[in-house]
Image (tube, helix red, strand yellow):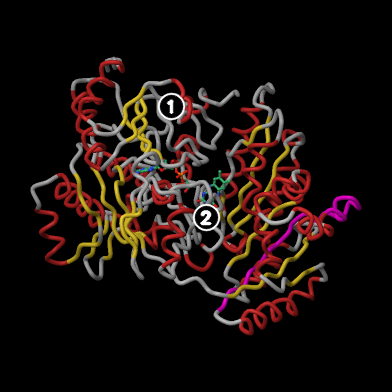
Amino acid sequence: MNSPDYQSIANDLKALLKGEVTQEEVDREKVSRDTSIFYVKPEIVIYPKSAHDISEVLKYVSSKKAEGMDISIAMRAAGTCMTGGPLSQSIVIDTTKFMNKVTSVDEQFAVTEPGVYYRDFEKKTLEKGWLMPSYPASRELAAVGGIVSNNSGGEKTLTYGKTENYVESLDVLYANGEGDVLHAFSGEELKQKCNEASEGGRIHKAMYDLVTQNYDTIMAAKPTVSKNSSGYYLWNIYNKETDTLDLSKLVVGSQGTLAAVSSITFSGVKPKEHSRMLVMFVPSTVHLGEIIVRMLSHKPETIESYDDHTFKIAIKFFKDIALRMGGNMFTLGLQFIPEFMMVLTGGVPKIILMAEFAGDTEEEVDDAVTKCYEDMKSFGLPMKKTTSKNQAKKYWTFRRESFALLRSRMKGMRTAPTIDDIVVHPADLPEFLPKLDEIFKKEVYKDLIYTVAWHMGDANFHIIPLIDVHKEGIVDVLHLLMDEVYELVFQYKGSMSGEHNDGLLRTAYLSKMYSPQIITLFEQTKNIFDPQNILNPGKKVYGDKDFAWSHVDKQ
Ligand SMILES: Cc1cc2nc3c(=O)[nH]c(=O)nc-3n(C[C@H](O)[C@H](O)[C@H](O)COP(=O)(O)OP(=O)(O)OC[C@H]3O[C@@H](n4cnc5c(N)ncnc54)[C@H](O)[C@@H]3O)c2cc1C
């Protein structure tokens, strides 16, 4: 492979595009990080103005790759990925600068460019009475292109599932620059699509053959946990009974490794008007599994939680939390008195569990929360029922803002997402949790500080170590921790990632989660879509652990 002359590539691309092409240090530096532990600096940053611009870049890059040049692209939305997904040494295409418009919204669907921040998108859909309910906890920071490409989930996923459920169709650009609209095709329409003399036709035909010829192997490999972002979701794309193929279900969650997304058509749900929260203060993980299983039987809309470390950090940075909540600092201070007292008296519970019930009337939610409250009394633990949405706000702010706070405020320490997103079956929690605890009790992890926030209803854990990257041997400790925790997760047929995805961080571990046949099918899928390996290489397939860990952010 030849080393590219990026100066002349930038000049060529400037002549081709309406958008901006830059090699400025400030732009390259800005996109060299996401919220993972990695730092990878690209040579060129592109801010496209349209799908046509992205197409031109892809055509150019594929022609250069065909000439033997070592060149590739990574798509980027808001850069909040926790796995190094949008990082590249070569070219980064950032859609948030110009491709940030919601094209149309009606009562059922919204069509949007990928660089629209979720917070802006939601305002538009709420005006029409609905929302896309799989928004992540990073709802104020993330953009829809990333949410789709990571197949994100969040606090409402327990009830509504992940982003894959709300993508109606995707406008994509394949690696050779050709465009296509991905949605479900069946019957005659599918035949026509597969016979189309286009890149889209070739890819549909090849993927149809791949899934139909390996149908049983693929279906048997489907992770049975309630949420999964790891691997390519080959099990979601073909319905044998109706002979329907939908490649949008494959591009969702593929981290820009199969195609670049230039437009998304979303559907959503009408949000429930009323909600009530039951907060439970749990002193240890001993009975947590049983508590969750019992809570789930009451069908709350969400069960979220965070641990004592997160709680103490949130109290320490109370001012930031209060600012994020908005409102009068004094009134907020009064609201937090019970929490201050817990810290002062050493009475901080190990886990704060939040079960929220949603409904169409006040009576409905009051009734649901009261029934759950009465039932949970038998555990003999302190509990609180909120009486308004406002009362629940502080718990939500702690839960949603904790990771961002940790990243920005812990001096000398940085967050190290590594085992940040494991997921098992809720029914396995009573057995799984003590085993997880045993791992953390080992001598090698005794100095490891970490916080835990859970999407508890899905048994999806965000365990985030806080590390001094300069400490000798710390990376080895993280590797060992990943090996041990993932092994335990796989014993329980869980997934390494419920929602954050694979990226640089986890791709090399996919061969431990899936069988060699499935890994081969993942590679074949990649080769069908992107035969030259120019779309975000090293993510989802052909992971290179050495490359990833030689790019740890030392800042
Ligand atoms: C405080 C905090 C809380 C978080 N909570 C959650 C959570 O609850 N649930 C969750 O799922 N995640 C969570 N995350 C992780 C992250 O925010 C989400 O995965 C988010 O959806 C990523 O969106 P983004 O716009 O930042 O995407 P980016 O980081 O820019 O990109 C993510 C991936 O998508 C690809 N991509 C981006 N745009 C395109 C495109 N147009 N075409 C093709 N590929 C593209 C990128 O290459 C990359 O691989 C959290 C992160 C933070 C910092």
Residue underneath mark 1: 27
Measured from the top left, where is residue 469 in percent x and y? 64, 26
Comparing 496 with 89, the one in front is 89
Which portion, as a residue range, is magenta?
340-359
Quarter of the picture holding the N terminus = top left
> In which quadrant of the rendered view does residue 429 lie?
bottom right
Q: Give the residue drawn at x 57%, y 45%.
A: 487
In which image quadrant can residue 191 be found?
bottom left
Disc 1 vs disc 2: which is toward the camera? Answer: 1
Q: Which mark is residue 219?
A: none
Image coords of residue 525 (percent x, y): 28, 44
Q: How far is the residue under mark 1 from the one under mark 2?
A: 42 Å
Q: Left or right of 405: which side holds 309?
A: right
Residue linked to disc 2: 493
Q: Is residue 472 magenta?
A: no
Answer above or below: position of 301 versus 367.
Answer: above
Q: Relative to residue 546, is residue 245 depicted above or below? A: below
> Is residue 493 found left or right of 213 in the rendered image?
right
SS under mark 1: helix
Asked if the residue at label 2 sits under 8 Å from ligand 1, the reply is no
Q: Describe residue 168's horizontal placement relative to residue 124 as left or right.
A: left
Viewer-proximal residue among 194 and 535 = 535
Q: Earlier in the sequence, mark 1 or mark 2?
A: 1
Tell me the amino acid under the disc marked 2. Answer: Lys
Q: How many marks?
A: 2
